[in-house]
Amino acid sequence: MIASKSQKNIELLAPAGNLEKLKYAIAYGADAVYAGVPDFSLRVRINNFTKESLQEAVEYTHKHKKKIYITLNIYAHNVHLDQIKEHLKFLKTLNIDGVIVADPGIIMLVKKYLPKVEIHLSTQANATNIEAVKFWAKAGVKRIVLAREVTLEEIREIKQSVPKMELEYFIHGAMCMSYSGRCILSKWMTGRSANLGDCTQPCRWKFSQTEKIYETTVQDDMQRFTVDLEEDQHGTYFFNSRDMNLSGHIQELVDAGVDSLKIEGRAKSVYYVATVVRAYRKIINALGKKNLSQVIREQQKQLDLLANRGYSKGFLLGSEPEHNFEGALSQSDYKFVGQIEGKKKINGKTFNVVFMHNEMFLKDKLEAISPKGNEKIKIKKILNHKLEKISEAHGGHDKRFLVQFDKVLSDKILLRRKLTK
């Protein structure tokens, strides 16, 4: 609990692309998670939530005294309405804490079928001003997920004008080259609609010219805006936004009136979710304390180690966010190796059960990532599923390995190794 105005009870809201990621988000410090079934949640791919696993997710979240919000933020067509009504009837059987919605028609259906559930307005609805927030307040919305285009000063003005409205703001994750994600590129290029949850992310693709020309200037008809398109051996990236990283501005967002700090990334790995959630948890816990600057620097170093498209402050400070024209992802100095899934005794020795994501060698010196911090560990022995001694283990399958480290590790600890150059 945060005591002063600068340390009020801020919610850290984390993505949950599946049940496993949800559990890691909670273990690493999230106060709440957001999740949804593929058909209605703007995450059709890399999302394996079913009715059964969503019910388990709600139970798990509440068991740990956290909150769960269900995403229902597609822009629906008539063909979707009957399915949405059935889904709302199902959600009524769950004890969910809120529904994230963009479509006014779906908001009306939520009020009909889930009259006691909080309605959170999705960033897809593009709420960017005081009057829009007042409108949604009259429509029964409890929380506004502000558009990414809203600046810090505008957040402050909105909170002062509509103080009872809860405000949520994205602080970390992928940025979209379109207005708060309302993009037609995917539908136009591939037939898959971003506004129905099936974005193929053409803004991240590389574009190559057919002619042997390696530099082109694109300019509008009145010569107000110019972009130099340069092509190298990797192609050209001219829609590719940098990722958002507001780790250095959490205090300002809290002071401006933001109630919930949201992380993007339901399609990311457990390693990404855990590392980002932990970073912002530590920063939030340090608000109002003398060591805040030090904690921010430490956690920014951890965020820099994740693969990213370069970081940007988005629109927060009133500038246009930077784009990454050079390429897709930066290369991290570390590789995510695997995750700890328990322990087992073999001939009186305690081994950890490890689910491998990438390769690990007996000679490797690893780092163990936990909610508290990082520590170096050494491998003493690796056994395969047949309990045979081996010198290396690889991911890409469902078999688990037994690994004896120089200390026994707890569940949900993640392993990474530094890449040699």
Image: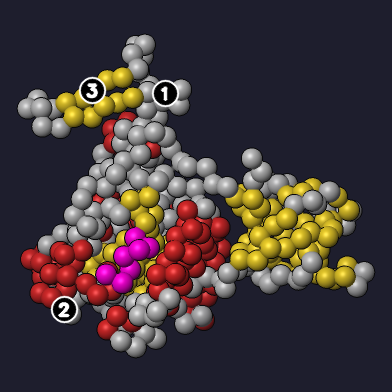
How crowded is the residue under tag 2: few (<14 C-alpha within 10 Å), some, or many (20+)?
few
Identity of the residue drawn at 28% across and 64% down: 169
Q: Which residue is mark 3?
A: 217
Q: What amino acid is found at the position of numbered circle 1 in the picture?
A: Asp
Instruction: Return the residue nearer the eye: 14 or 288.
Output: 288
Identity of the residue drawn at 21% across and 25% down: 218
Quadrant placement of the C terminus: top right
Q: What amino acid is found at the position of numbered circle 2 in the picture?
A: Pro
Q: Nearer the viewer, mark 2 or mark 1?
A: 1
Residue 302 percent coordinates (x, y) = 51, 59
Q: Secondary structure at mark 2?
A: loop
Q: What amino acid is found at the position of numbered circle 3 in the picture?
A: Thr
Q: CA distance from mark 2 to mark 1?
A: 51 Å
Q: Which residue is mark 1?
A: 232
The answer to whether any part of residue 199 appears in the image is yes
Q: Earlier in the sequence, mark 2 or mark 1?
A: 2
Is the image coloured rainbow, by chain, by secondary structure, or in one colour?
secondary structure
Span highlighted in magenta in the image: 246-252
Q: Nearer the viewer, mark 2 or mark 3?
A: 3
* Residue 248 among those drawn in magenta: yes
